Image: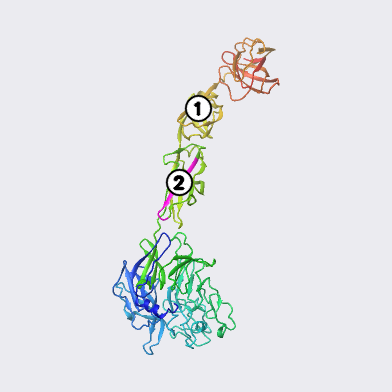
Amino acid sequence: MRRAPAAVLSLLLLGLPRPAAATPPPGFTDSLVTTIGGPTDLAFTPDGRMLITTQGGALRVSTGGALLATPALTISAICTQSERGLLGVTADPAFAANHRIYLFYTFLRPGDSVCVNRVSRFTLPDSNVIDPASETVLLDNMSSQAGNHNAGDVHFGPDGYLYVSIGDGGCDYLSPANCGGANDASRDENILLGKILRITADGGIPPTNPFQGAGTARCNTTGRTTPGLRCQETFAWGLRNPFRFAFDPNAAGTRFFINDVGQSAWEEIDLGQAGADYGWNCREGRHTNNTSGPCSPTPAGMVEPIFEYSHSGNVPGTSVGPCGSITGGAFVPNGLWPGFDGAYLFSDFNCGAIFSVGDSGASGNAAGFDTGLGGGSAVAMTFGPAGSTQALYYTTYAGGGQVRQILYTNQPPVPSILTPAAAATFRVGQSVTLTGSATDPQDGTLPASSLSWTVLLHHGAQTDPFFGPMSGNNLQFMAPAPLDLASADTSFLEIRLTATDSLGLPATVTQNFQPHKIALTFATVPTGLTVTVAGTPQTAPQTLTSWENWGLGLDAPTQTGPGGATYIFGAWSDGGGAMHTFMTPAADATVTATFQASRNDGPVDYFTVTPCRAVDTRFADGPALAAGASRTFVLTGLCGVPSTAKAVAIDVTVIPSGSGYLNMHRGDELPGSTSTINFQTGIVRSTNSVMPLGAAGDVSVLSGAMGSVHLVIDVVGYFN
């Protein structure tokens, strides 16, 4: 971190209380986990133990929500002046099997009392007491020339390798008078200072490290190698004080951000990349810092930060500032906090605030997340277990030294479907209004824009979208008909109302909306004949489920019935034709089709007669047939037609006053479904026809005209 003024630093290290009034976003709580002096870093073991490092050299363990009284380890040979101390901790990915942890601390060399930074591996047993003899030093003798700019973070990446951040030492290890912006140690590739390092869990060099082979050497023991060679441990370089870095748990591969503390003007966040040069001390953030020494000329290929902010104003996009020492960092796991997928959190030690920025930083703006934490906060951050969920944990020097927890506690909205009512049913074609309401513990009554409606059509075991999703309130849709007759009994609508609060937390309620089901019984006279309902043949009597106001297509086809007789349509009980649409009523009903047996003992011989006029309604057989009227005329005994005749051959002439049709049929049968003759207003129309006679030797005529019509029947022969 940046060197703090002596008085402030002393205050922090003494652990004296400092005021803090944390203000996390609505729906979050910022609460104390434990009080501990000088907490620098924290990590979790896979079995849920919290490991806390203190600047003074003690490693503390908190388990079951309680801080153990006895430190797991106290490092005696340690330097704690300025920013030195026990600075970083992480657990091995295979901790469950090997119980290994890794510590970054400033070691006091016993021979010359020089302070150097080192990374060591220890074994943490279930007893939470570490044997100092279990230490294995992996990286050593990394200069801490001025006491600050030690960096100090250690993490395992998703690739299984151990990453370590090292600062530039504050002052040049070769020229101690060159400090701050004049310190070019980060530009020396033969030393581990100002770098991100990557090694294996045993201290070896990963095969994909960028600097290997000719021109490289190991630097793990001495912290350096011969000038002109590169350290094989180096993953990236050109950093001032990369105090904290964090891996992205949402990424498919190994991806991490580096928080590099700036000098006098700019703080930056860098995307970790193998072999990258981030430019210090030639530049600070995206801005020129130095144009002399190794910065003359300015080196090519330096990688720019993805986000930066100035010391002279507010953090971009916020009203918080001025700030000036970037510290902790953590990616929010996707799905944990509504509205924060893809967010990266970073903190600033000077202004005591945590900020959120998109994981690419492309917008150039951040958002204030948790402010008012007090000076000296938040030093380190990580996500860890919190009951059945996860919380963000951070260490702070404020308040005497604490570990705190930021937990998402937002409660979901409570929505209700008001219309249609829970017990309501619908009829086909009905206009249905969707009305709902929602309240939120944090937001109060939610506006209509926070409501979203979806209606699904269930039919059998299948579900299809029917309406929406659509936002708003008092929305309308037209109630459907069932997909087919077979699914009418099991189909219904499911209404879903989702309310989303201001933090993006949704809540959904559902309500089944049933059709008004009607039992329709289809009967025939005589019984046992077949009718077609909605395209499906049904043998009567048959009771089927329909929905109110559903138009069913009905048909009463000619068919062979009992005894081999042919049955033709006579009438439907609702008055419709043989084929028509029946609108399902609001109550259970019976629909009957009446059939007539067609006589099959008909004429076998044909006899002609002198054409003879048997009927003329203009004269003695009048009056004219009125619209919709039916008349019966006996033809046997006229024009030479004997009483034994079964049918007659006739010419039919109509003289209409309007348009329409005539339907002629046997006198002892009901009208058929087809016309004998069609006509138009004022046009005399004639046709020839063979007409079966009823038992009384008669024919019946039904007028479907729009006005009156005269009828003339001339007989030309008969069948006997």
Question: The disc labelled 2 sits on which kind of residue?
Answer: Gly
Viewer-side residue, 501 vs 493: 501
* Image position of 637 with respect to 430: above or below: above
Question: The disc labelled 1 sits on which kind of residue?
Answer: Leu
Q: Earlier in the sequence, mark 2 or mark 1?
A: 2
The quarter of the picture where the C terminus appears is top right
Viewer-side residue, 677 vs 254: 254
Report crowding for label 2: few under 14, some 14 to 19, many 20 or more residues within 10 A (C-alpha).
many
Kindly check if marks 2 and 1 are in contact, taking CB atoms under 8 A apart as contact. Answer: no
Q: From the viewer's perspective, is the residue at label 2 or at label 1 nearer?
A: 2
Task: Please tell me whether residue 441 belongs to the stretch shown in magenta.
Answer: yes
The quarter of the picture where the N terminus appears is bottom left
Task: State the residue position of label 2.
Answer: 436
Tell me the chief SS of the magenta region: strand
* Image position of 581 with respect to 476: above or below: above
Q: Secondary structure at mark 1?
A: loop
In this orientation, does residue 253 appear? yes
Q: CA distance from mark 2 to mark 1?
A: 50 Å
Q: Is residue 288 left or right of residue 111?
A: right
Q: Is residue 700 left or right of residue 37?
A: right
Residue 529's tag is: 1
Task: Please tell me whether residue 107 belongs to the stretch shown in magenta.
Answer: no
Residue 59 image offset from top left, x and y in percent: 34, 76
Q: Is residue 495 left or right of residue 700?
A: left
Image: magenta residue range = 432-442
